[in-house]
Image: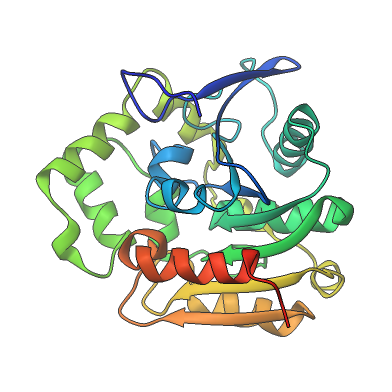
Amino acid sequence: MTTSAASPEIARALTLGECTINVHDAGQGEPILLIHGSGPGVTAWANWRGVIPVLSQRARVVAPDMLGFGYTSCPPGMPLNVDAWVKQLTDLLDALDLPKVSVVGNSFGGAIALALAHRHPERVKRLVLMGAVGVSFPISEGLEKVWGYQPSLEAMRELIGVFAFDHRIITDDLVKMRYEASTRADVQQRFAALFPPPRQRGVEMLALPEAALRGITQQTLIIHGRDDRVIPLEVSERLLRLIPHADLHVFGECGHWVQIEKAEAFTRLISEFLLEEKK
């Protein structure tokens, strides 16, 4: 994996059509695609920084900044929607010569993982959905705050408090780091354009019809924090009922940041599901 001395968030720049994708590609072996969530200033590295170093010891881990986020760039005015995000991923897998991967999707990324599995089932081996969207639900107050974020240190501190159950992790350094990420260059301008009001439309855009979810054939592990204030636990419970080959693991005393608040247990859980031979 090539990283920048200036920032570990910057990895390999890969040109796909008119877009330049910032993508982390680490390790060897079974390929696993990580799709980040949609928080302000998010990047693949910010989302998965605790997972990539551990998982890449046993597998090949590919984690792109999705179109509209992070250090990935695309032409101004390019429509960014589920069609564009799924095409980004299939083009990326083609460029990396990866015909089939297991996919881990967080929140927004979970919805894109489901869309990829629905539209291109031959490309997806197994699915992990963490605090995923994927079905229609009345937008939560927490998700409204995430997508409606306006940059300030106070707003970022409040937002991290929405993401995390354990507020002891909310340090001044963390708030400052995430605030600065949300105000870098044109990040906020791009972010605000992704999910404009009324933001319920964003939920509907990311939702799959129930019939499509019933047609998901991959073995699926659904993970959720019991105390998630962004995506309600009930969303994952509905996914469990709809996806035929699904299991649900719920972490108590945990919010939307499962991969951060329960880092060791989360990484162990997905490693066992994706990499261990099944009896």
Please report the residue visible at 70 percent of the width from the left and 79 percent of the height from the top. 246
Does residue 259 lie above or below 10 as drawn? below
Please report the residue visible at 79 percent of the width from the left and 38 percent of the height from the top. 90
**Whether residue 73 can be seen here:** no
Q: How is the image coloured?
A: rainbow
Q: Residue furthest left?
A: 172
Q: Is residue 60 left or right of residue 44?
A: right
Does residue 266 lie above or below 96 as drawn? below
Camera-side residue of 97 and 119: 97
Camera-side residue of 86 and 144: 86
Q: Is residue 136 left or right of residue 163?
A: right
Corner quadrant of residue 62: top right
Q: Is residue 209 left or right of residue 58?
A: right
- Horizontal and vertical percent for residue 84? 74, 35
Corner quadrant of residue 167: bottom left
Camera-side residue of 126 and 80: 126
- Horizontal and vertical percent for residue 165? 27, 70
Q: How many marks?
A: 0
**Whether residue 16 can be seen here:** yes
- Quadrant, the C terminus: bottom right
Q: Is residue 138 left or right of residue 39?
A: right
- Horizontal and vertical percent for residue 14? 64, 20
Does residue 14 lie above or below 164 as drawn? above
Camera-side residue of 256 and 202: 256
Please report the residue visible at 68 percent of the width from the left and 22 percent of the height from the top. 78
- Horizontal and vertical percent for residue 92? 72, 32
